[in-house]
Amino acid sequence: MSTVTKSWLGVPISEIRGSQSPWGAPEFPLVVPAYNHSVLYHVQNGRPIDGDRPPKPQIGRDKWDHEFVRMPCSNQSLYPFEDSNGDCHLKKRWEVIESSLWKPIRDSRELANTILSYNTKFKKIWKFKALHKLFSEYLDEEETQYFFDVTLPEIAKLALALPKLIQSPIPLLKQHKNYSISLSQQQIASILANAFFCTFPRRNTKKKSSEYSSYPHINFYTLYETDGSESVLEKLKCLCHYFRRVCTKVPGGVVTWTRRSVPPRGCPAWGSSGSPLSSLPLHVDSDTTIEDAHGLIQVDFANKYLGGGVLNYGCVQEEIRFVICPELMVSMLFTEVLRPNEALLIVGCERYSRYTGYASTFQWAGDYRDETPLDSSGRRRCAVLAIDALPYPSTVQEYREEMLTRELNKAWIGFTFHADPESSTLQYPGVATGNWGCGAFGGSPRLKGLLQAMAAAQAGRPLAYFTFGDAELRDHIVDVYNALAKCGVTVGQLYRLIVRFSKTNVLRSDLYDFLHQVLRDGEVDKLRGTQHERMETDSTPGTSTMELSDSLQTELLKEFTSTDSPDLFSTDESLIEIKIDKSDPSDNTGCHSQLSNCTSKLFDEMQKLDEEDGLTSLSMPQESPLEQNASCDGDLPKRPADATSELKARVNRKITDYFSRKPV
């Protein structure tokens, strides 16, 4: 194996982009309102968005049902309110929120009480440990004072601007639908400000039967509720920095989310694919990160619940990407859990923060000024592709043929976004990816590297693979790819070889050694000479390959979570319902009164009224976020963090180091 001094092997990165410039590839389709594309801002014909001024909101009509996001500012969003006389009545939620957010908030205790004023069901439950720790122990006193004096009042104003900035209903990106949503960055900032203050209704429960149990959490309370490990506090610093930036200067661009669902019969018959691997331009780099692969489609090693553990302990690839580019977090508001045959593409997000480290060593490292140019629709030319891999409790499980097919389909569905199925030429831009589904998820980088190369070759998209510092893996991937390409191996032949390998003792064998041996023995010629029966999409009457994969996914998740499942949403909660603690702890943020029976009944009545129009959809079995896979490399288990002077001394940079003392 040759020794190299450069960090990459294969073709130059320009061959992955299709040009010397990162921005030479064709733009993605323009933003045009359509039956399958909701645009929440006004699109002016013939006038491109320049990014200097935010576009005006699109005028529409409020909707309060199971097809759209239930907004806190909706006139139909009511909340049980108990007055000073103990009498109960319903009040518009937004009036309570406005009243609370207009008041001065001077410290984390007052911030917690503000959030609880319109989330009274959780007065005895939410403790805001991480929030208090950030401002009372982790940040310097000067930083804390600046946040509450300058930044927080602006976040409150941004949150309260929601009914003015978003005047059309936001549809839910539901399963089995091909649909797009476009929002302005200003609208996104207002949504995230409301998530910061935990205002979104119906999004706080963990009950399996709840309306949004198949959606990620969006209110930030889950992050505030952690014990405040150092990586959690650094994520909070990233979010505080984002709000300081957008409150100082309103961003003027837009972002588009597109969900893609491909029916099982639309996926390739992998065992009979004739696509040659040699047609794939491959670039493998051990030093560069995916988010620095400018101009390419950048893969998010996603959780099927978008965002994974970003609002909890998670701090790996997806979570880090979401906190340095917080606009991605809006996906969590409206994207239903991804199925095996679905992917999500986000075009236009901006990066706001630098960072160092990974997982427990993650740290916010200061301001980042994103110089990515805008496309003709006003979106930054940054495309993030969310595809979720499965967790594997053992290597044997990963090599099951059904699992190989599932991962190939998932990658191919993502890689063929906005591709021309009739074209025989390469599709640009290429894809930037890496060790998808590895780490705590138990995936093998060697296998995942080959599977993604196969999916890219089938999709006709060039591939840049980033090994995250692993030069040995870089060399091995390029060596086996060169050997396969030299022998003219097709995607279908490689698929059949991997299936053959899966029938050996995979725990004692190495996939790449096996492939090299097959090539040396000339067995590829035998594969060419045999007529391979085409893989049918329907394996048995009424059971598709995709459906079978989905059931196996559930089986794997049960086995995975019973062993070493990464803690995604909580460290101390399983599939349990929230119960009100009847004790009266001394650190309960100063809110001691319990809801009366009258108020509780009002909650129940409101729930019944709102569900009358959606009993059909709610009667379907829902999956709890706690039962699903974490983001690519898994989330960190709960670990204690010392809040001492030594801890504060380890903070290398202050948030305010990058803030102007006066509004710009």
Image: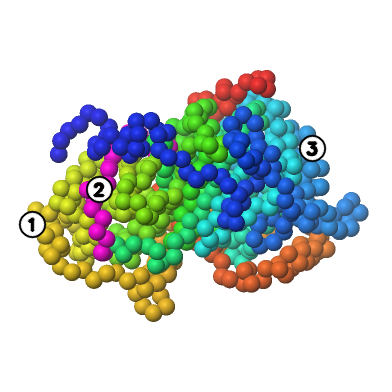
Vertical position of residue 609 compared to residue 388: above or below: below
Q: What kind of residue is marked 3?
A: Trp
N-terminal-most mark, 2 or 3: 3
Pick the quarter of the image with the N terminus: top left
Q: Residue at x 59, y 53 (%)?
A: 34
Q: Position of residue 643 (x, y in %)?
A: 55, 35
Element type at marker 3? loop
> Which of the marked residues, 1 or 2, is nearer the chain's N terminus?
2
Question: Are dots 1 and 3 in contact, CB under 8 Å?
Answer: no
Question: Dot 2 lies on which element?
Answer: helix
Q: Quadrant of residue 211?
A: bottom right
| Residue that badge 2 annotates | 279
Kindly report the distance in space between the C-alpha atoms of the residues bearing marks 1 and 3. Answer: 76 Å
Q: Residues within 10 Å of mark 2 (few under 14, many from 20)?
A: some
Q: Provide the secondary structure element on which disc 1 rests.
A: loop
Region rendered in magenta: 271-291
Which is more foreground, mark 2 or mark 3?
Answer: 2
Give the side of residue 208 with respect to residue 122, left or right. left
Question: What residue did someone put label 1 on?
Answer: 521
Vertical placement of 56 versus 624: above or below?
Answer: above
Under mark 1, the amino acid is Asp
Q: Residue at x 37, y 59 (%)?
A: 409
Up-down relation of residue 111 to residue 142 (above or below): below
State which quarter of the image contains the C terminus.
top right
Q: Residue furthest left?
A: 521
**Local crowd at mark 1 within 10 Å, few (<14), some, or many (≥20)?**
few
**Residue type beneath disc 2:** Ser
Residue 369 horizontal side relative to residue 132, left or right = left
Residue tagged 3: 102
